[in-house]
Image: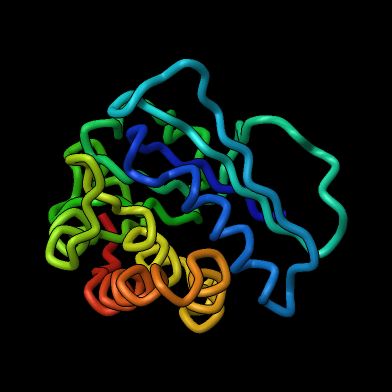
Amino acid sequence: MIEIIQISRGGSGGVTGAKILADAAMHEDKFGYSQAIPKYGSERRGAAVEAYVRFDNKPIRLHSPVYDADHALVLDESLIDRIDFEKVSKDGVVIVNCTKIPEQFKGSGRKIALVDATRISQELGLVLSGFTLVNMTMLGAFAKGTEIVSIENLVKAIQEFWGEKRAPKNVEAAKRAFEETKVVIA
């Protein structure tokens, strides 16, 4: 089973992104099961929101938060301290919405995928009520950084979720992030 923890801000599309990532995994031949679990309460836009995603080739019986993740997605760099990276596999990838290796990872030997998701999303006009929607952009970075879900299957899941009218900009965001993501060893 592959387990992912994600941290975002309410209103940035993190929960929706987790659902689409789970759907994209279903298009991969190696996974027959997936789930996305949001963790939020009465938070409002701008508050920290966690989501958990699991993929497996057999039924997933767990329905709890992810405590020991294989990978981590950080949609807002200011929230990076909210994840206990000791609980994220050293062999996994940490995907961060930023342009430079965060201080806490320097010299750690961790595989980090960096992308300026905020810039890409803003350039494409993916802003709603003043919040930049970085979810699809970060999924493109996930596809590039982990190579678990192909960009083709991610695009298919985005198109299925958003439909003909809303999919094009979201697909472009994912594809641009896939191309622009830099994968480094900290």
Considering depth in this image, is 5 or 37 the residue closer to the camera?
37
Residue pushed farthest bottom?
152
Considering depth in this image, is 123 or 60 the residue closer to the camera?
123
Could you say which quadrant of the image residue 177 lies in?
bottom left
Could you say which quadrant of the image residue 112 lies in?
bottom left
Rendered location of residue 164, percent (x, y): 46, 77
User: Who's the residue at 47% across and 16% down the image?
Assistant: 42
Rendered location of residue 27, percent (x, y): 67, 75
User: Who's the residue at 57% across and 71% down the image?
Assistant: 160
Rendered location of residue 75, percent (x, y): 32, 45
Question: Is residue 88 left or right of 11 when viewed as pictured?
Answer: right
- Asked if residue 124 is positioned above or below residue 176 in the image, the reply reads above
User: Who's the residue at 36% across and 26% down the image?
Assistant: 48
Rendered location of residue 88, percent (x, y): 50, 41
User: Who's the residue at 55% across and 47% down the image?
Assistant: 4
Considering depth in this image, is 20 or 166 the residue closer to the camera?
166
